Image (cartoon, rainbow, N blue to C red):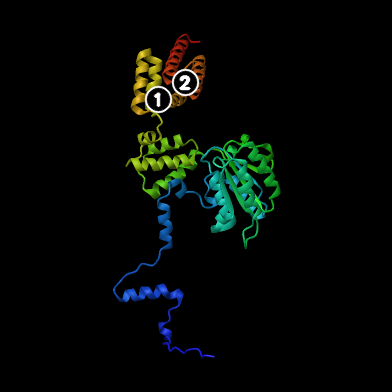
C-alpha cells in the first residue's frame, strides 16, 4: 500500500495568523501604514440613511407603546395585559390616522423585540378580503409554531371591516380553534361592519380623533428635526384640516415642505386642495348679497381658477354659516338645502344645476330673514 505523500509547507508564525474577528482591524492597520484611510462600517449611519427616504408618517411612527400619541388609557391597559401574560384578542376601531396600526405594531415590538416580524402575520383585509385568505394564509400561520420560541403569535388584520361576511364567519371559527397559539388584532374604521360573533370574542378599544394639542406636539417635533419653516397661521391651518388625523397632518406637512420654502396658511390650503377661508367668505357673501347672475359667474370663475369642486365649497359654506347671524328659520332652510345639494352631487348630479339650485336656496333664505320669520 502506497504511503501518503509528505508535502513540506511553511508553518505560519503566530504573528502572521490573523483571527477572523480581528481581520478588519488588521486590514485597517495595514492600510493606515500605507497612507490609506478606511472608514469602519457604520451600522447606525446605515439605519439613519434607511429612514431618510421614508415618508414622514413611517419615519416618525411610534416604536414603543409609550411613544403612541394620546390614548394613554388604551396603551396602559394593554401594558397591564402583557405584564399579566393574559393578552386577549383585540379589536381596535376608529377614524383613520388615530394610531390603531401604530399601537398594534408597538405591541408586537413589546412582545417579541426586534425579531417581531417573524412572529406576526400582517394582512390588509381591503386587498385580501375573501374566504380563501382565511382558509389558507391565516389558518396555515395559526397552525404553525416559531422554532425555539414560546408563547403565541400575532395576526394583524387591518381594515377588517372590508372583509366579506363569509370570510368573517370563517375567521370566527379560526379564532376559536387557535386561541392557544395565536392572538388576533383586528383593526377597522367602522365597528358596525364587524359581525357580533367576532366582536364578542375580542376586547374592544375605540380610537377617537386626536386632539389638536396632541397633534401639535408631534408636528412641532417633526418641524424641528426636518427644518421646516412653518408659520403660526400655517400650523393652525394644518391642525384644522387634519381633523384629528395624524397621518394626514404629517403627509400634508411633508408635501408643503417639498413645494414651498415657507409653509404658511396659503401653502397648506393649496397643497390640500381645500378652498381658502377667504374664498369661502367671498362665495357666501356673494350668494347672499349679489344678483343671481353675478354670484353664479363669481363662483364659476373661482372654481376654474382654483380648481375647486362644488362639494368643497359646500363643506366650507357649512362651517362659515356658523359665523353668520341668521334667523332660525333661514339657517334651518339653508342647512337643509346644503345637505340635499351635497347628496345629489354624490349621486352624480350636474354641478351647474346643483349650483343654480343652491343659489336659489340662498336667495330664499335671505328673503326669509328680511321677513323676520
Left or right: residue 263 compared with residue 173:
left
> Which image quadrant is residue 109 in?
bottom right
Picture quadrant where residue 190 is located: top right
Question: Image point 62% across, 34% down: which residue?
Answer: 192
Q: Work out how far the residue at label 2 is from the one at label 1, CA to CA, in angstroms.
A: 22 Å
Comes first in the chain, label 2 or label 1: 1
- Within 10 Å of the Cα at label 1, are there few (<14), some (14-19), or many (20+) other Cα atoms? many
* 208 lies left or right of 292: right
Residue located at (45% from left, 24% from top):
314
Please, which residue is most extreme toward the front here? 1
Question: Which quadrant of the rendered structure holds the N terminus?
Answer: bottom right
State the residue in front, 331 or 107.
107
Q: Nearer the viewer, residue 324 or 313?
A: 313
Give the image location of residue 196, x and y in percent.
Answer: 68, 37
Residue 349: image tag: 2
Q: How far across and how far down the image is residue 55, in percent?
A: 43, 46
Q: Is residue 318 above or below residue 214?
A: above
Question: Residue 149: horizontal and vertical position, in percent?
Answer: 63, 61
At x 40%, y 17%, the residue is 287
Q: Which residue is mark 1?
A: 280
Residue drawn at x 40%, y 39% is 235
Answer with the quarter of the image where residue 118 lies. Answer: bottom right
SS for tag 2? loop
Which residue of the protein is positioned furthest toward the right in this rendering?
A: 177
> x, y percentage for residue 299?
37, 21
Q: Secondary structure at mark 1?
A: helix
Marks 2,1: beta carbons within 8 A:
no
Amino acid at each position: 500500500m502506497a504511503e501518503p505523500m509528505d508535502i513540506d509547507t511553511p508553518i505560519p508564525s503566530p504573528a502572521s495568523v490573523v483571527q477572523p474577528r480581528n481581520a478588519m482591524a488588521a486590514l485597517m492597520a495595514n492600510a493606515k501604514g500605507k497612507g490609506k484611510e478606511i472608514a469602519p462600517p457604520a451600522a447606525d449611519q446605515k439605519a439613519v440613511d434607511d429612514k431618510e427616504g421614508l415618508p414622514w408618517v413611517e419615519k416618525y411612527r411610534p416604536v414603543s407603546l409609550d411613544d403612541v400619541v394620546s390614548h394613554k388609557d388604551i396603551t396602559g391597559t394593554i401594558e397591564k395585559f402583557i405584564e399579566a401574560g393574559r393578552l386577549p384578542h383585540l379589536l381596535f376601531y376608529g377614524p383613520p390616522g388615530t394610531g390603531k396600526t401604530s399601537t398594534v405594531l408597538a405591541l408586537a415590538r413589546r412582545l417579541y423585540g426586534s425579531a417581531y416580524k417573524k412572529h406576526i402575520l400582517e394582512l390588509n383585509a381591503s386587498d385580501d378580503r375573501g374566504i380563501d385568505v382565511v382558509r389558507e394564509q391565516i389558518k396555515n400561520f395559526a397552525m404553525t409554531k416559531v422554532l425555539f420560541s414560546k408563547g403565541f403569535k400575532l395576526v394583524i388584520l387591518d381594515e377588517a371591516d372590508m372583509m366579506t361576511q363569509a370570510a368573517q364567519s370563517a375567521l370566527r371559527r379560526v379564532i376559536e380553534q387557535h386561541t392557544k397559539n395565536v392572538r388576533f388584532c383586528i383593526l377597522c374604521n367602522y365597528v358596525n361592519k364587524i359581525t357580533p360573533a367576532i366582536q364578542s370574542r375580542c376586547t374592544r378599544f375605540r380610537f377617537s380623533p386626536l386632539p389638536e394639542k396632541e397633534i401639535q406636539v408631534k408636528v412641532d417635533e417633526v418641524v424641528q428635526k426636518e427644518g421646516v419653516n412653518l408659520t403660526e397661521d400655517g400650523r393652525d391651518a394644518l391642525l384644522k384640516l387634519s381633523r384629528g388625523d395624524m397621518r394626514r397632518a404629517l403627509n400634508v406637512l411633508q408635501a408643503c415642505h417639498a413645494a414651498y420654502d415657507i409653509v404658511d396658511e396659503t401653502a397648506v390650503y393649496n397643497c390640500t386642495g381645500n378652498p381658502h377661508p377667504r374664498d369661502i367668505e367671498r362665495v357666501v357673501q356673494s350668494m347672499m348679497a349679489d344678483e343671481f347672475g353675478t354670484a353664479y359667474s363669481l363662483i364659476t370663475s373661482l372654481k376654474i381658477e382654483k380648481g375647486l369642486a362644488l362639494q368643497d365649497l359646500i363643506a366650507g359654506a357649512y362651517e362659515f354659516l356658523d359665523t353668520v347671524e341668521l334667523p332660525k328659520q333661514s339657517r334651518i332652510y339653508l342647512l337643509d338645502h346644503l345637505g340635499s345639494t351635497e347628496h345629489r352631487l354624490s349621486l352624480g348630479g350636474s354641478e351647474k344645476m346643483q349650483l343654480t339650485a343652491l343659489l336659489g336656496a340662498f336667495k330664499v333664505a335671505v328673503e326669509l330673514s328680511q321677513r323676520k320669520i
